[in-house]
Image (tube, rainbow, N blue to C red):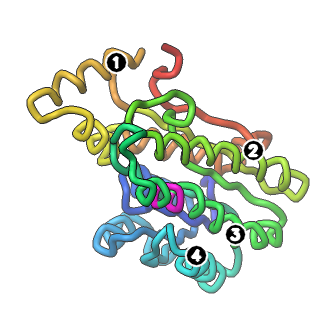
Amino acid sequence: MAKLDQKVIIITGATGGVGSAAAALFSAEGARLVLTGRDEARLREAASACDPERTRWIVSDNTDADSIAAVVALAIEAFGGLDGVFANAGDEGKVVPLAQMEIEEFDRIWRTNVRGPFVLLRHAVPHLIARGGGSVVVTSSTGALAGVPGMSAYGASKAGLLGLVRTAAAELGSLGVRVNALVPGGIENRMSRSVLSQMAPPEHLEAVAAHFLMAIPLRRLGNNEELARAALFLLSDDSSYCTGSTLVADGGLLAM
């Protein structure tokens, strides 16, 4: 049987590399999906890789509470309930020394990366409980567990998510709702390219990228599909005894 057969799942950040890969995989595993992101063209593209009868999409902004509430409302209206949430939307922000970070930029990253998932869970949890339980997966980052120079806002926000995950898991476990964190690092997609390009001028980018690869024991970057499979494990019944946990998918980066 498909791992997500008939389960209603929300995916935020569905326009990104990991989110779109997860959409295609979850659809293949039988899920009924609500996809959301800020870019309508890319959202349509992500939805096109899914079963059209079991997929809905809606443009939303992770910093806007009403927009997030509309995502949950669509899931209930379209499919009559909710079984899981993949809170995957995030923003790396600017790579800049802490003392030069604009407070407005810090606040923007925090609203996107922490407040957004909190609001999503606030609206989704009652529906998960009404369903008899469910699974929530929140995308954090290795930046939450190891300092990355120039990424104070991002690192702080992703560490904040781990606190949210653990608190929610402790609070909701007895109600049948599992909450886990997915912690990627070194993934070949737009976000990692953005970070690397901000860290090094074009003429040094190749050398910086090669140095980073040497810090990964597997000596390669991960891909979006690998992260999608990790999220599938946490959302499915395969991880039925996992809650409050942190699944790191970083090729061994944090082991160094």
Using the rendered image of the protein, determine whether residue 28 is visible from the camera's viewpoint.
no
Which residue in the structure is indicated by mark 1? 219
Magenta-colored stretch includes residue 209: no
Cα distance in 3D space between marks 3 and 2: 17 Å
SS assignment at label 3: helix
Q: Tell me, yes or no, whether the two marked residues, 1 and 4, touch with CB atoms within 8 Å.
A: no
Quarter-of-image position of residue 116:
bottom right
What kind of residue is marked 1? Arg
Which residue in the structure is indicated by mark 3? 124
Q: Tell me, yes or no, whether the two marked residues, 1 and 2, touch with CB atoms within 8 Å.
A: no
Viewer-proximal residue among 113 and 227: 113
Cα distance in 3D space between marks 3 and 4: 13 Å
Are there few (<14), some (14-19), or many (20+) residues within 10 Å of tag 3? many
Q: Which residues are magenta?
A: 108-112
Please tell me whether mark 3 or mark 2 is closer to you in this view: 2
Magenta-colored stretch includes residue 109: yes
SS assignment at label 2: helix
What kind of residue is marked 2? Arg
SS assignment at label 1: loop
Q: Earlier in the sequence, mark 2 or mark 4?
A: 4
Q: Tell me, yes or no, whether the two marked residues, 3 and 4, touch with CB atoms within 8 Å.
A: no
What kind of residue is marked 3? Ala
Which residue in the structure is indicated by mark 2? 166
Q: Residue 65: which numbered mark, if any?
A: 4
Please tell me whether mark 3 or mark 4 is closer to you in this view: 4
Using the rendered image of the protein, determine whether residue 50 is visible from the camera's viewpoint.
yes
What kind of residue is marked 4? Ala
Please tell me whether mark 2 or mark 4 is closer to you in this view: 4
